[in-house]
Image (cartoon, rainbow, N blue to C red):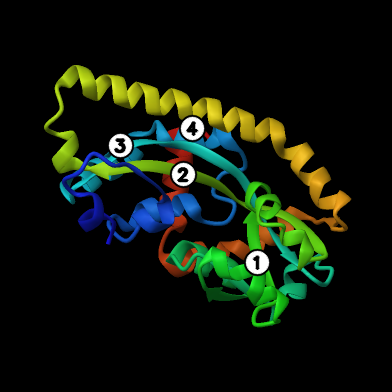
């Protein structure tokens, strides 16, 4: 587990809310389909008292969140047949990272979730072990997913926020001035990184198109409606409503 790997050493790793939900269940809502529509909405959630409570609970379990504002763009489905509606996803075996928020969201939108490492996805699609993946443009381009997928179904269903997490046993021993420097630097770098990712989306999409992929625009409201079942399954319908009220969304 993450806490055992980094508990007492000065190393921070990149993770996300889905994986953090193994320790504090409710923080996983951040990786649910259509929880936030863009980066700025996510920042509003991060600044709520509820989110602060979750990060405090992670500290109690030995994990220190240095920042939760790294951003890698929105995830969409990529596969070899055109998909326009949730009904078109029926029977489409789709790779997910394996955490409950991803699995529930993908299933609710109509696909069949299948958990394998991202490093295995290219070969799995190529050999037809799976039919599709759901992924952000940065990873799609860097792994040449366009070589094995023909279509991008532009659902943009999960805006992928990442966190830097280290062991509290190490962090707690630092002088207060060092703690402040680290936290401020991580947050500021997270914002700078996010703005670069936002600015790069059109260019990344062009790379996919130039390499033969077709971008399918969809009615996101249909997918949002389908995704509601995932919130009900995980018991987060009321929690989402409360957070939206707190964050002013």
At label 4, counting other C-alpha atoms closer than 10 Å, the crowd grade (few under 14, some 14-19, many 20 or more) is: some
For mark 4, give the secondary structure: helix
**Up-down: is 194 above or below 159?**
above
Badge number at residue 30: none
Image quarter where the C terminus lies is top right
Badge number at residue 162: 2
Q: Are marks 4 and 3 in contact (CB under 8 Å)?
A: no
Per the image, the residue denoted by label 3 is 52
Q: How far apart, in angstroms, are the residues tagged by discs 2 and 1? A: 19 Å
Asked which quadrant contains residue 246, the reply is: top left
**Residue nearest the observer in this picture, 93 or 45:** 93
Q: How far apart, in angstroms, are the residues tagged by discs 2 and 4? A: 12 Å
First in residue order: circle 1 vs circle 4: 4
**Residue nearest the observer in this picture, 141 or 217:** 141
**Up-down: is 134 above or below 10?**
below
**Residue nearest the observer in this picture, 145 or 239:** 145
Left or right: residue 244 compared with residue 144:
left
Residue found at x 64% / y 62%: 134
Q: Are marks 2 and 1 in contact (CB under 8 Å)?
A: no
Q: In x, y percent, where is residue 2?
A: 28, 56
Is residue 221 among the parts visible in the rendering?
Answer: yes
Per the image, the residue denoted by label 4 is 43
At label 2, counting other C-alpha atoms closer than 10 Å, the crowd grade (few under 14, some 14-19, many 20 or more) is: many
At label 1, counting other C-alpha atoms closer than 10 Å, the crowd grade (few under 14, some 14-19, many 20 or more) is: many
Q: How far apart, in angstroms, are the residues tagged by discs 3 and 1? A: 32 Å
Per the image, the residue denoted by label 1 is 133
**Up-down: is 171 above or below 189?**
below
């Amino acid at each position: 587990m993450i806490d055992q790997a980094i508990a007492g050493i000065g190393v921070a790793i990149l993770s996300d809310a889905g994986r953090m939900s193994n320790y504090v269940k409710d923080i996983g809502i951040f990786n649910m389909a259509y929880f936030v529509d863009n980066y700025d909405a996510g920042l509003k959630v991060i600044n709520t008292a509820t989110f602060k409570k979750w990060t405090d609970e992670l500290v109690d379990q030995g994990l220190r969140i240095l920042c939760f504002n790294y951003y890698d763009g929105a995830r969409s489905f990529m596969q070899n047949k055109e998909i326009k509606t949730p009904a078109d996803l029926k029977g489409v075996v789709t790779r997910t990272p394996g955490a409950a928020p991803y699995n529930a969201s993908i299933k609710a939108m109509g696909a069949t979730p299948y958990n394998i490492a991202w490093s295995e996805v290219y070969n799995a699609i190529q050999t037809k072990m799976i039919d599709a993946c759901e992924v952000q443009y940065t990873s799609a381009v860097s792994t040449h997913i366009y070589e094995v997928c023909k279509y991008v179904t532009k659902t943009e269903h999960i805006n992928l926020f990442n966190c830097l997490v280290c062991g509290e046993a190490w962090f707690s021993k630092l002088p207060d001035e060092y703690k402040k420097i680290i936290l401020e630097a991580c947050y500021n770098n997270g914002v700078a990184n996010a703005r670069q990712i936002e600015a790069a989306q059109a260019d990344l999409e062009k790379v996919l198109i130039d390499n033969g992929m077709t971008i399918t625009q969809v009615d996101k409201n249909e997918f949002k409606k389908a995704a509601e079942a995932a919130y009900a399954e995980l018991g987060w319908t009321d929690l989402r409503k409360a957070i939206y009220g707190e964050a002013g969304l």
